[in-house]
Amino acid sequence: MTLAPLLSVPLRLSGYFDSIAALLRNLMHQPKKLYAGITGTLFLLAPVLNLGSVRILNEFMEEIKLPSTMSAKSYLVGFSTSVMWSPYFASVSLVLHYLNISFEEYILYGIGLSILSLVVGNILFAVWERRNPLSEKLTPNAPIDKEHSRQMIKLVLFVVILKSACLVVEKFTHWSMIVIVCLMSILVPLGYGVVSKDWKRMAAPLVDFRDRTVPMLNNEIMLFMSAGMLAFAIKGTSAANGVSTFLGHLADRSFILFALAVMLIVLSITYMGIHQIAAVGALAMQLNPAEIGISNIGLALLLLLTWSISTALSPFSGLNLMVSRFAGISGVQTGLRANGLHLSIIALIGIAIISYIG
């Protein structure tokens, strides 16, 4: 959480963000393609930059003045996919750590479900836009040039290489993905500085990271630490044992009932303002996959799908709070009204896939 924002330094100095802005401006007059561009960009950037990707993208979108519903749909759909597969997210690193699963084993399942969520979101938006035409509200701009196209290709390669490096290091060292992510967050900006020899330009964003970004994370760091402590405190209590016994009985009867119960429990807890790390973390530590008849991969995928859905729906989550502020509507409207159908469909599809593989 603290070190990953360093990765934005080489991205910003290399001009990738300018190319993204040019691409999105080029799609202003085509709502469906613009929506695909926003969600695709977040799918690419969010796994590396976390919530910073939404903030950066909104800066590009301010001049376009998107309708509130379109902002709520595109930001939540694009970002929530990363919660299910990116090792730079606490969700993936912690759940895989608790269930003793390597990122190499999990990555294809996580990214597959994320891509499916992205496709479903774009299909649903196309249907919604047909009923609520936006073409008249969006105006065209100049086409993107070849240099920006090359920059976008380089950005895709950068993300692929970054993720591949994490897999290679994990395979040969067997280190925790949390350690690998921290090292990558430090080494990539340093490597960029050595190769570009542009330390003068790097000085300003690094000072800004030290003086502004890190202090701003104080509340989030305390939130994660206290939520994690709560999860450990809950583990083994009579209440936690009762919940795991109840879920075990449901699993014996029907996996679908078990999966729906897990989702409802986490959604109820997060809707009260308790962070996902406490609810999902407690379940990950408390549930034994062998006892409930599910593989470790299946349980991890279910918990991360639940984390992703609750992140989008809960009006207290950082993502929902940020997007509702940008869109100018309430957290309930941002989550339930704008994205309820999409999240419901992904939940049902996800449960079906997990019941098959798990």
Image (cartoon, rainbow, N blue to C red):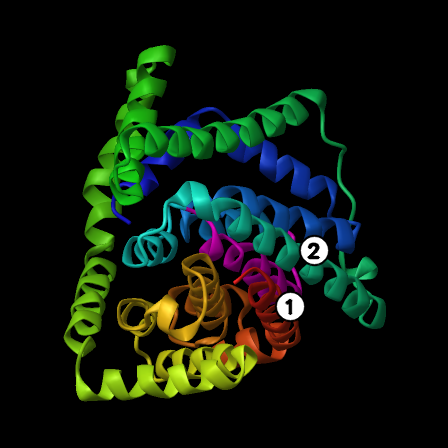
**Helix, strand or loop at mark 2:** helix
Q: Which residue is mark 2?
A: 119
Give percent across and percent down for residue 285.
26, 67
**Does residue 279 appear left or right of residue 224 in this picture?**
right
Q: Residues within 10 Å of mark 2 (few under 14, many from 20)?
A: some
Residue 162 image position (x, y, % from top left): 43, 31
Which amino acid, mark 2? Val
Q: Residue at x 23, y 63 (%)?
A: 224
Q: Would you say residue 357 sits in the magenta stretch?
A: no
Name the residue tied to disc 1. Answer: 349
Contact between labelled residues 1 and 2, with CB atoms less than 8 Å apart = no
Identify which residue, 310 or 299, lies in the foreground: 299
Circle 1 — which element?
helix
**Quarter residue 284 falls in:** bottom left
Residue 84 on the magenta span? yes
| Residue placed most toward the observer, 44 or 298 | 298
Q: Look at 66% across and 64% down and name the residue there.
A: 70
